[in-house]
Image (cartoon, grey):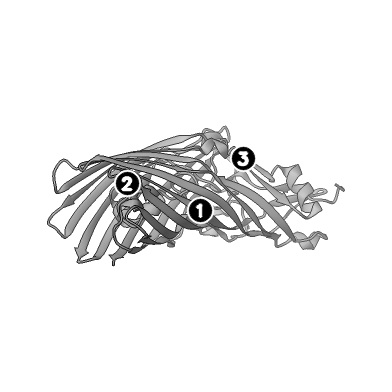
Amino acid sequence: MSKKTPIIVFAAVLLLTAMALANGLNLNGLGTRSQAMGGAFVGIADDFSAVFWNPAGAANFRQTTFGVYAVDLIPTATYRLQYEGSIPEVFPIDAKTKVSHYLGGMAAYYKPISSRIVVGLGLSTPSGLGTMWDGADFVTTLGGTAYDLSSKVGVFSLSPLIAVKLNEWLSVGATLNINKGNFNLKMPAGFADLGEETVDLGQYEENMNGWGFGATFGVLAKPVDKLGIGLTVRTPSTISFKGSARMSYLSLYGLADTSDLTRKITWPLWIAGGVSFRPTGRLLLSADVHWTQWSKLDRITTEYLDSVWAALMEASGNDVRPLRWEDRAQIRFGAEYMLNATMALRAGYYNDPAPSPDATLNVLLPSHTYNAFTLGVGKTIGDLQLDFGIEYLAGKDRSPESLYYEETYGMRIVAPSVSVSYKF
């Protein structure tokens, strides 16, 4: 590179957006009834959300079933930073995200084609969230500029399903998962050294989308009426993103202000086991263990197709972002109590440990340990089922050690949801 080619420096405290995703890159479940039972549903899987939790559960459907689920994810992220010592040009940061609503959901259809075989189709958003900061909160230098600070990531999955009832107590099922991903990001571009002058490169924006494929396999055993035992395996799915990026001021220095880019992100292997038990006719209890192979996300690499962009991103180290995530297991519990033949109350709890070590924690991909509490109610009207639920995820604050500043990351998520299903 010539001496006039800028070396971009992204300030460590201004990675400047947060994808506030529970469970690493995933949402923690789909379906209001299952959500209200803490997501401990692998050993139950007896409603339209079976396509997500355990496709083997659909083998027990004796009627054509259709259902829809909608959830509103409302994250609140906080970030505080205080520099050590006296730096008069730099202010402390005390930032809180704007109130934002990120809608997710699922629709699923199942049809028995014989006494033992059920086919179906599901459309869902297994990943879908983001945050929106007030850029003014991150202006740390006198006379600084408030840039747009927002992110949105989503995955839409189309999942054809087949489930087979092998005998009276054992069922198996599988889906093909066709995944469409979207990735949108806005943040400051950072600064560049031009000779003896350091200049602001303005607003950075990128928009990407891509496709990936995977599969889900499930087994559900009911050796006795009161007991259910389930196992689900979801294979990894690598989504190959393509798109473009822009730095608004780069053209002022005789360089292209846009570049095409590619990035691959793998949604890793997920294995879940669950047990359900009905001690009385009115009470259903459940417990699950979910394991995710987050260690596959060791780093995120971005390839910039413009040669100048590629050179300066490589020189600054911003083409490779280390994650060093670790495998994690969740423990979940749920309960459902029938007040009468048509009304149910539900509650649940789960612990979701953070996959990210302190060394790679940043506001671009925040990672928190969550304690999640869930409540819900269901009402049956003939063949119509109505379910309402709410989930509260309390993220544990994180404060990585640093010689130069003290920083604290916080996260809370509220997720109300509703489901409607019908059998005919």
Q: Count neighbours of disc 3 (C-alpha within 10 A) and say few if under 14, some if 14 to 19, many if 20 or more.
A: some
State the residue position of label 3: 299
Mark 3: which secondary structure?
A: strand
Q: State the residue in front, 403 or 360.
A: 360
| Residue shown at the point (68%, 45%) measured from the top left | 318
Alpha carbon distance from label 3 to label 2: 32 Å
Mark 2: which secondary structure?
A: loop
Residue farthest along the front direction in this orientation: 114
Q: State the residue in front, 336 or 417.
A: 336
- How far across and how far down the image is residue 382, in percent? 20, 66
State the residue position of label 2: 41
Residue 220 in the image: above or below residue 105: above
- How far across and how far down the image is residue 68, in percent? 36, 64
Q: State the residue in front, 259 or 165.
A: 165
Name the amino acid, label 3: Arg
- How far across and how far down the image is residue 286, in percent? 26, 42
| Residue shown at the point (32%, 63%) measured from the top left | 64
Name the amino acid, label 1: Asn
**For the image shown, how many numbered marks are present on the structure?**
3
From this viewpoint, is residue 1 visible? yes
Q: Quadrant of residue 226?
A: top left
Q: Nearer the viewer, mark 3 or mark 1?
A: 1
Q: Quadrant of residue 170?
A: top left
- How far across and how far down the image is residue 201, in percent? 71, 57
Name the amino acid, label 2: Phe
Alpha carbon distance from label 3 to label 1: 24 Å
Q: Which mark is residue 177?
A: 1
| Residue shown at the point (41%, 59%) measured from the top left | 120
Mark 1: which secondary structure?
A: strand
Q: Nearer the viewer, mark 3 or mark 2?
A: 2
From this viewpoint, is residue 7 visible? no
